[in-house]
Image (cartoon, helix red, strand yellow):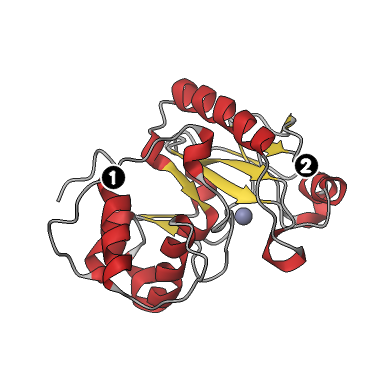
Amino acid sequence: MNYSFRKKNKIVKFIILHYTGMADLKSAYKKLSSLNSNVSCHYLISRNGIIYNLLCPKIKAWHAGLSEWKNLSNLNDYSLGIELENKGHEFGYNNFTNKQYSSLKKLLFFLCSNHFIKFEDIIYHSDISPNRKKDPGEKFFIEKAGIKKKKFDYSTKFSVRKLLSIYGFSKNQINLHKDDCIKSVKRSLNYKIINSNISDRFEKNFYNLLINKKDIKY
Ligand SMILES: [Zn+2]
């Protein structure tokens, strides 16, 4: 198993959700537990809802890779990584199962209360590495894991760049990979077609997504 020790000044603030992107559970487990793979995670949830605890949350796992969020980089330092078994975009992207959602719900509520993590800080690999990663992707519905989303009316107009920054993308990522950031947001919004086009509907959906993040100050 790959891991490092957390530095004392770097506390866990985020939960990062992934899919395994491998043909089956066995190969995903093998990769996540092999020393040669250079990756690892804290939890793995199989399609039949079994939660495998691979590393203690006190230990730093290697799941995020090159990543930036808000003003932080290398998110492994600040996060717990949960992998959901799914073949992913490369091998045949499936819907996540109800058993996975119900186990994920239990795990998220447990981890958020134990580590004082806010629901809005449950983020996706595609959020922190938009130019490299698509997971967990547009077939993942966080509300099925008990994280509620409310609907609000679109009232104030912000530029898309401003919305991307409020969402959490780093300045660097917005400057270098704006289109990928937009695609990442569309995945979070469960769009069926993922492209970087900006429509009124997208701006409205994006605004609604943001307004759900309670502690955001404008
Ligand atoms: Zn990932």
Q: Which mark is residue 178?
A: none
Looking at the rendered structure, the kind of residue marked 2 is Met
Badge 2: how crowded within 10 Å, few (<14), some, or many (20+)?
A: some
Please name the residue shown 31% across and 40% down the image. Answer: 150
Residue at the image point whose x is 82% and y is 55% from the top: 36
Q: Position of residue 143 (x, y in %)?
A: 47, 39
Residue 172 visible in the shown view: yes
What type is the residue that disc 1 sits on?
Answer: Lys
Name the residue tied to disc 1. Answer: 151
Q: Position of residue 45 (x, y in %)?
A: 70, 37
Label 1 within 8 A of ligand 1 by Cβ: no
Q: Going from the N terminus, do you reach mark 2 or mark 1 first? A: 2
Give the tally of numbered discs.
2
Residue 60 image point, x, y percent: 60, 40
Tell me the element at label 2: loop
Which numbered dot is residue 1?
Answer: 2
